Amino acid sequence: MVERNELKYQYIKLMKGGHSLRDIRAMMRSVTAGIDDEYVDKKEKQSLSHLVGGLQYLTRRNAIDVMKLKFSEPRSLPSSREEYVSNYVSGYNGSLPHNWKRYGSLIRKGRPNPPRPGTSKRHIGRSKIIGASKVLRDARQLTATLQNMVRKYGNKKKAGQLAKQMNIVTSVIPK
């Protein structure tokens, strides 16, 4: 797990340094910093991580048992919740936990300055997660409907195929 100061430093450096967020690595680092508890509402962050957990369950398996499908976080995460969510949202395909070693212009020239707590407040604002709780509610309702269909009519295979056809688009827009 990366230290919070390093996380904030890299985020500020990426945003102020004119880095293109088309670079997946830069996007992953920025999203991880932006969805920290300090900058985002806890409920929205939790609903986003539950949504990502359910979507990854759907995409990882070939045959889905609809009766076991639920939109919740996995029991054990390979790294922090922030890295887990930003890995999915940004489209980063690297391994978790993420390697936070500095690269390119993130490497400081000269001796390091002493840390000054609270200096990131003027640079990093609140993050908005738009639509995650509504999509999560709709996905849970769809799952419940599919489970009721299976109980009533008994066709697990077809219900699993319907669940896999859910199209959800994720995007990150820096401001």
Image (cartoon, helix red, strand yellow):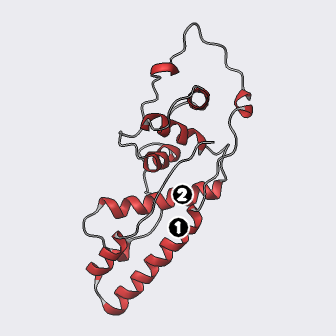
Position of residue 97 measured from the top left corner of the image (x, y, whole percent) = 42, 38
Position of residue 130 measured from the top left corner of the image (x, y, whole percent) = 60, 58
Q: Is residue 73 visible?
A: no
In the picture shown, does residue 81 fall above or below 167?
above
Q: Residue at x 58, y 62 (%)?
A: 131
Which is nearer the N-term, disc 1 or disc 2? Answer: 2
**Local crowd at mark 1 within 10 Å, few (<14), some, or many (≥20)?**
many
Q: Residue at x 50, y 52 (%)?
A: 171
Q: Residue at x 34, y 86 (%)?
A: 150
- Give the residue pinned by disc 2: 48
- Residue at the bottom extreme of this rendering: 152
Q: Residue at x 70, y 41 (%)?
A: 125
Q: Quadrant of the C terminus?
A: top right
Front-lying residue, 6 or 104: 104
Instruction: Inspect the image, locate mark 1, and give the three-letter code of the amino acid beneath it.
Output: Leu
On the picture, is 83 further left or further right than 173?
left
In the picture shown, does residue 152 fall above or below 138?
below
Q: Is residue 72 visible?
A: yes
Residues at marks 1 and 2 touching, judged by CB atoms closer than 8 Å: yes
- Give the residue pinned by disc 1: 136
Position of residue 90 measured from the top left corner of the image (x, y, whole percent) = 46, 46
Front-lying residue, 16 or 40: 16
**Local crowd at mark 2 within 10 Å, few (<14), some, or many (≥20)?**
many
On the picture, is 90 further left or further right than 152?
right
| Residue 99 quadrant | top left
Position of residue 144 measured from the top left corner of the image (x, y, whole percent) = 46, 80
Instruction: Inspect the image, locate mark 2, and give the three-letter code of the amino acid beneath it.
Output: Leu
- Residue at the top extreme of this rendering: 110
On the picture, is 152 further left or further right than 51?
left
On the picture, is 141 further left or further right than 43?
left
Q: CA distance from mark 1 to mark 2?
A: 8 Å
* Label 1: which secondary element: helix
